[in-house]
Structure formats: C-alpha cells, structure tokens
Image (cartoon, helix red, strand yellow):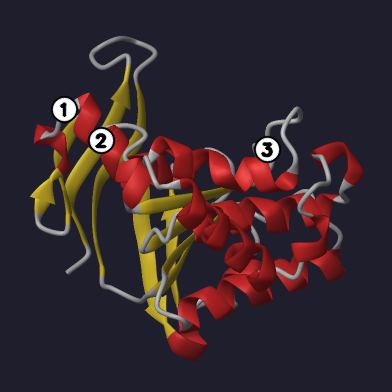
Amino acid sequence: MLIRVKDVYKIYNEGHENEVRALDGVSLNIDYGEYVAIIGSSGSGKSTFMNILGCLDVPTRGEYFLEDVNVKELTDADLSRIRSLKVGFIFQGYNLISTLNAYENIELPLIYQNIPAHKRRDAVFEALERVGLKERYLHFPSQLSGGQQQRIAIARAIATRAPIMMADEPTGALDSKTGIQIMETLEELNKSGSTIILITHDNGIAAKAKRVVRLSDGHIISDSRGETAV
C-alpha cells in the first residue's frame, strides 16, 4: 500500500474557544497507480489533507504511513527528502519563479536533488516534450499563457520522476479548453504509472478521476469508484 492514513486529526488552537478541526478522524488508503480526486467545498479540509499527504504538514494526532514509513516519526530533513523525491506538486498558482525561464524552473528541483547536469538536461527536455512545450524552454513565465505556465509546472513535477503527483485545483485559474488539456495530461501521467491525487471543489473535474473521496467539515462522507464516483 502506498498511503495509509489512520484516524488523522489536524486541530488548530486545540482546547481553546476558537478551536478548528480541519481534519476530524480521517482514515484512507491509496494504492500505487490510483487516480483519486479529493473533493469538497471551501473549508472542508481538502487542502489541509493534501498538505499532510504531501508531507508539507504533520497531523495533530493519528498515523500517516507512506510506503509503510510512519511520517510522524520523520525529521524535517526526512520530510524534505520525501517532498523532493517522492511527491510532485502542481498548484493552482503554478508557483513558477518569474526570474527563471521554463528550462530553469523545471531544472531547479533537480539541482536540489544533486542530479548531474547532463542528466538534468535530458530530464528537462523529456518533460517539456511530454507537455508539448519543448520549443518554449527559453520563455519566462510572463511570456507564457496561463495554460502554458501550468504545463511547465506539470513538467517540473514530471522531471523529478516522483511516483506521486498531487494537483491542487490545477485548472482553477484556466479557461475550460485549457483545463481539459491539463486534465488529459494528468490522465496520461496516470496511465504511465503515476499515482495522481487531485484536490478540487468541482464535480466535473473530479469526474475525470477513477475514485472520488468527498470531504465535509473534516470528515470523509463518501468514497466511490468508477462510474458511481461522482
């Protein structure tokens, strides 16, 4: 099993009058190669859940096992290594560095991984090829459309060869046509073996996944697969 979440709580200001239970006893298993959408309205806990799954945050209580490793027992350095090697993040805001061109944005996490320059080059151009933007490698974010910037962000995640792709509202800032292209790219990544975890508030976007987990007020209220997922 790739991911095992057992009775996880994320509580802010615990014990105080303004206590907030962003996650309230969540349990979930995700296997290798799944394509899972985690859906919920604003305040449902879905972004908090993604932060924990992506090792950007740790639970207040409960257990999270990533490939049978208890994440709560890891050091900050261990968590950083997991984020670098095992998880590729795709955010609604793209998170590209404006002073770096497309090639440099994709290459940056590979530099942090201490990958040799010639291997970085191969990985960057392979990723650019997969998202159809190889000819734009010298363009800066300001010279790219929103859809192109999101594809560069996806290429950055692809280049790290991370087995898990976490996409947080990846089409939220895009027009519908470009959004469809982004979803097709995620589907292709899943077909090639990547585990996709998609965070969304949109039923139409969630319907593209093979499994839909619905959150409300920090609780999982449904977990469906196939045609009955949404």
Provide the residue designation for mark 2. 79
Rate crowding at label 1 as few (under 14), some (14 to 19) or many (20 or more) other CA atoms within 10 Å.
few
- Which residue occupies the extreme bottom position in the image? 227
The residue under the point 88% across, 51% down is 145
Provide the residue designation for mark 3. 96
From this view, report whether residue 121 is shown above or below residue 224: above
- Which residue occupies the extreme top position in the image? 16
Q: Classify mark 3: helix, strand or loop.
A: loop
Across and down, in percent, residue 60 comes to 21, 29
On the image, which quarter does residue 174 sit in? bottom right
From this view, report whether residue 211 is shown above or below residue 176: below
Q: Which of 11 and 155 is in front in this view?
A: 155
Across and down, in percent, residue 215 comes to 43, 54
Label 1, label 2: how many angstroms apart (C-alpha)? 6 Å
The residue under the point 26% across, 32% down is 58
Label 3, label 2: how many angstroms apart (C-alpha)? 22 Å
Number of numbered callouts drawn: 3
Cβ–Cβ below 8 Å for labels 1 and 2? yes
Residue 26 left/right relative to 193:
left
Q: Can residue 5 be seen in this view?
A: yes
User: Which label's residue is closer to the chain start, 1 or 3?
Assistant: 1
Cβ–Cβ below 8 Å for labels 1 and 3? no
Provide the residue designation for mark 1. 75
